[in-house]
Image (spheres, rainbow, N blue to C red):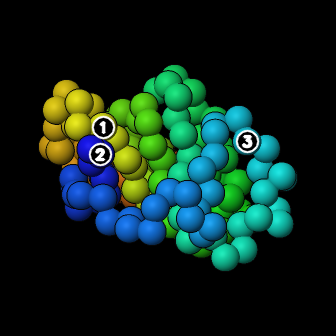
Amino acid sequence: MTVIVTDAGFGPETWTAGFEAETVLNLTSDTDPASLAGQIAGVELVRIAFPSFADGRGFTLARQLRLMGYNGRLRAHGHVLADQYAMARRTGFDEVEISEELAARQPQEQWLARSAWTSHNYQARLRGSTAAS
């Protein structure tokens, strides 16, 4: 069983089409964004795997997908920590999928503490605004 983390906190899985559907892309963190140019049209959900909390390539991949025009649902899954939630949101993720075990070790309050990610945007503060981009 998994837990879905959004800015509202923990919630249940809401994706009902299955992860093998034609409208889903399951990507590894080492996927070359250029190889996806012709594949993202019509995709409703992109899941990017985080094999380790120390592997930040998924954040770069998410940002590249958004810059390429992908506007569907973007989900990080795997070893993403509460401390990384703000970065996940800033780079374009809509939600994070974690295990029940991780949710027990890092309860909802820890994730919610980072849910005001637009208020704690270091780069925006340097530019003199609070907007994340």
Disc 3 secondary structure class: loop
Between marks 1 and 3, how big is the CA–CA gap?
Answer: 23 Å
Q: Residue at x 48, y 47 (%)?
A: 76
Viewer-side residue, 70 vs 129: 70
Label 3 with label 2: CB-CB less than 8 Å: no
Q: What residue is disc 3 on?
A: 31
Rendered image: mark on residue 2: 2
Disc 1 secondary structure class: strand
| Label 2 crowd bin: few (<14), some (14–19), many (20+), radius 10 Å | some
Question: Residue 93: in sight, yes or no?
Answer: no
Question: Residue 80: in sight, yes or no?
Answer: yes
**Sequence order check: which comes first, mark 2 or mark 1?**
2
Q: Residue furthest bottom?
A: 42
Is 48 left or right of 8, judged from the image as shown?
right
Is 69 left or right of 98, judged from the image as shown?
right
The amino acid type, in three-letter code, at marker 3 is: Thr
Q: What residue is disc 1 on?
A: 99
Between marks 3 and 2, how big is the CA–CA gap?
Answer: 24 Å
Res 84 → quadrant: top left
Label 2 with label 1: CB-CB less than 8 Å: yes
Q: Tell us which disc is closer to us: 3 or 2.
A: 2
**Sequence order check: which comes first, mark 3 or mark 2?**
2
Disc 2 secondary structure class: strand
